[in-house]
Image (tube, rainbow, N blue to C red):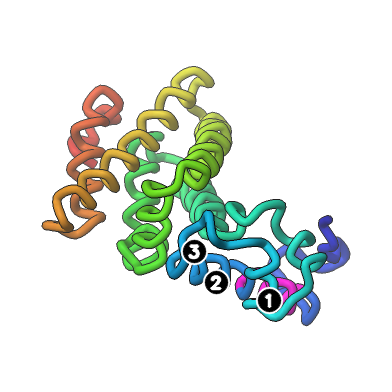
Amino acid sequence: MDTTDRSAAPDSPPGLRERKKAATREAVHRAALRLTVENGLDHVTVEAIADEAGVSRRTFSNYFATKEDAVLWGEEQQAAALLRAVAGRPAQEGPWTALRAALRSFEPGPFSPDRETITRTRLALRHPSLLGRQLATHAGLEQDLARVLAERGAEPLRSRVLAAAFLAAMRTTMRTWFESEHPAELLDLADQVLHLMGRPFDDPGAGQA
């Protein structure tokens, strides 16, 4: 349930209640991630996650529908951050350029190879239910990303193709990075994949940008 205070200014700092809710959500997420790494998803229950986080089972349900949601909460945070970054790029940038620039703007942020991103990816590759939940998040992100690109002026069908291609490039990047035992910086590898993927989408005069 959304209990955000609508009377507050959009850019105002979160109040005490919002900060407490954010801290609780983070604690539950960390507990879920830690227990899944230690025991495997099949041996982790919602009750165990709640106990580890020091909250009730009901409180867990107020924040997450399933244990998979709790483990992969960081995926949603990354998706939201990417959407904000793309929407905030200069209006004169073409869509593919804006996507690539938005990704690079996170260095060394949520799209760099931090420990949690690596852990979540490994867990998703190991557990089908986590992979399914991750793919569902990516499907939602694809729709939202296409909408943001269309709002920036891209034709709707082109926006969908661009969003799908960009996220396919991100999946290819992560798989390649893991399978090759991290021979390069993740964002540098992403640049290479995006350049190859984006040749048909490169904005006129943008070269490799």
Instruction: Place residue 13 in its image quadrant.
Output: bottom right
Contact (Cβ within 8 Å) of mark 2 with mark 3? no
Rendered location of residue 42, percent (x, y): 53, 54
Task: Tell me which residue sits at (57%, 37%) in the image.
Answer: 140
For label 3, the SS is: helix
Task: Say whether residue 15 is left or right of residue 99.
Answer: right
Which residue is label 3 attached to?
Answer: 36
Quadrant in which the C terminus is drawn:
top left
Q: Is residue 101 above or below residue 94?
A: below
Quadrant in the rendering for residue 43: bottom right
Quarter of the image with the N terminus is bottom right
Residue at (49% x, 63% y) in the render: 36
Q: CA distance from mark 2 to mark 3?
A: 10 Å
What residue do we see at 35% from left, 34% from top? 168
Work out whether mark 2 precedes mark 3 in sequence or the reverse, and give the earlier one.
Answer: 2
Residue identifier under label 1: 51
- Is 99 magenta? The answer is no
Mark 1 → mark 2, Cα distance in angstroms: 12 Å
Q: Residue furthest front?
A: 43
The tag on residue 142 is none
Magenta region: 18-26
Decide which of tag 1 and tag 2 comes sooner along the chain. 2
The stretch drawn in magenta includes residue 20: yes
- The quarter of the picture where residue 200 lies is top left
Is residue 145 in view from this perspective? no
Looking at the image, the residue that sits furthest to the right is 7
- SS under mark 2: helix
Please identify, in this view, whether the residue under mark 2 or under mark 3 is nearer the observer: 3
Q: Which residue is mark 2?
A: 30
